[in-house]
Image (tube, grey):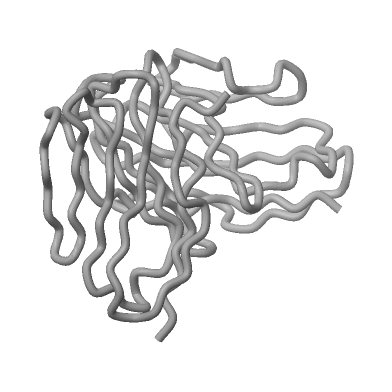
């Protein structure tokens, strides 16, 4: 998976707690994308960020979910007051360029969130 | 509405057989990418096709981009158990990469 690091790999939270998922992109990549995958379903886009900017958050629920990609440090996907329906695999991808022809995105191994 | 439709959704074949999976859209894409995802892992990029009509080969895998850049196919020759996984096509539109629903391939030894 070409160096995109996500942690933790597995996260268990009780309903109402907060979940923080981290993603360190590949070296030299300044574009980060977050996706959610439910069992037996495809990857659903959540948010696209560049350093310090949210470019497109059209796939992210308006409440309880937020994302950031600070100048220093990893990108964070934060889910407040988790509910059972938030249980899923969350994948982060990074790319060197933005949405252009030949842009290639490389994925991390994902964080599997389980809400009990 | 799914921008990229993949077929078949599930495919189970014997080792040594050939197979083709398809990725179709009513929209034109500037490029399409194919990924393979194994259980518990993230998708791994296999190839990017850019030019209409382009054919790329990766060992036993042959990828083709349609002339109109609305569809793509992946052909696997002499499938092996190690080919088992979820195959996803994806392409950029606007600010997003759109992913197909995937083809889940099982190769039986």
Q: Residue at x 24, y 74 (%)?
A: B78
**Image quadrant where residue A55 sits:** top left
**Image quadrant where residue B64 sits:** top left
Residue B29 locus on image (x, y percent): 29, 22
| Residue nearer the viewer, B40 or A12 | B40
Decide if residue A63 is on the left or right side of residue B90. right
| Residue nearer the viewer, A115 or B13 | B13
Up/down of A47 relative to B90, above or below: above
Up/down of A41 relative to A66, above or below: below
Which quadrant, please, contains the N terminus of chain B? top right
Q: Residue at x 44, y 16 (%)?
A: A52
Q: Residue at x 30, y 33 (%)?
A: B71
**Image quadrant where residue A93 sits:** top left
Up/down of A88 relative to B16, above or below: above
Which quadrant, please, contains the C terminus of chain B? bottom left
| Residue nearer the viewer, A103 or A13 | A103
Pick out the residue farthest to the bottom.
Answer: B109
Q: Residue at x 34, y 49 (%)?
A: B35
| Residue nearer the viewer, A22 or A39 | A39
Decide if residue A70 is on the left or right side of residue A14. left
- The total number of labels drawn is 0
Residue B6 locus on image (x, y percent): 44, 42
Decide if residue B95 is on the left or right side of residue A22. left
């Amino acid at each position: 998976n070409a160096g995109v690091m996500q942690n933790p790999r597995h996260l268990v939270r009780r309903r109402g707690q907060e979940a923080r998922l981290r993603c360190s992109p590949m070296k030299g990549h300044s574009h980060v994308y977050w996706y959610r995958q439910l069992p037996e379903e495809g990857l659903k886009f959540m948010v696209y960020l560049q350093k310090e900017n949210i470019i497109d958050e059209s796939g992210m629920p308006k409440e309880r979910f937020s994302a950031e990609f600070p100048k220093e440090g990893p990108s964070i996907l934060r889910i407040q007051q988790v509910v059972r329906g938030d249980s899923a695999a969350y994948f982060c991808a990074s790319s060197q360029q933005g949405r252009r022809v030949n842009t290639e995105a490389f994925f991390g191994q994902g964080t599997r969130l389980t809400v009990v | 509405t799914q921008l990229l439709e993949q077929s078949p959704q599930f495919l189970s074949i014997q080792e040594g057989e050939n197979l083709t999976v398809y990725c179709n859209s009513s929209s034109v894409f500037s490029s399409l990418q194919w990924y393979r995802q194994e259980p518990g892992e993230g998708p791994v990029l296999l190839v990017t096709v850019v030019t209409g009509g382009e054919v790329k080969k990766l060992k036993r895998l042959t990828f083709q981009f349609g002339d109109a850049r609305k569809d793509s196919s992946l052909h696997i020759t002499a499938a092996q158990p190690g080919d088992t996984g979820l195959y996803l096509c994806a392409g950029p539109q606007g600010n997003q990469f759109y992913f197909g629903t995937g083809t889940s391939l099982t190769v039986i030894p």
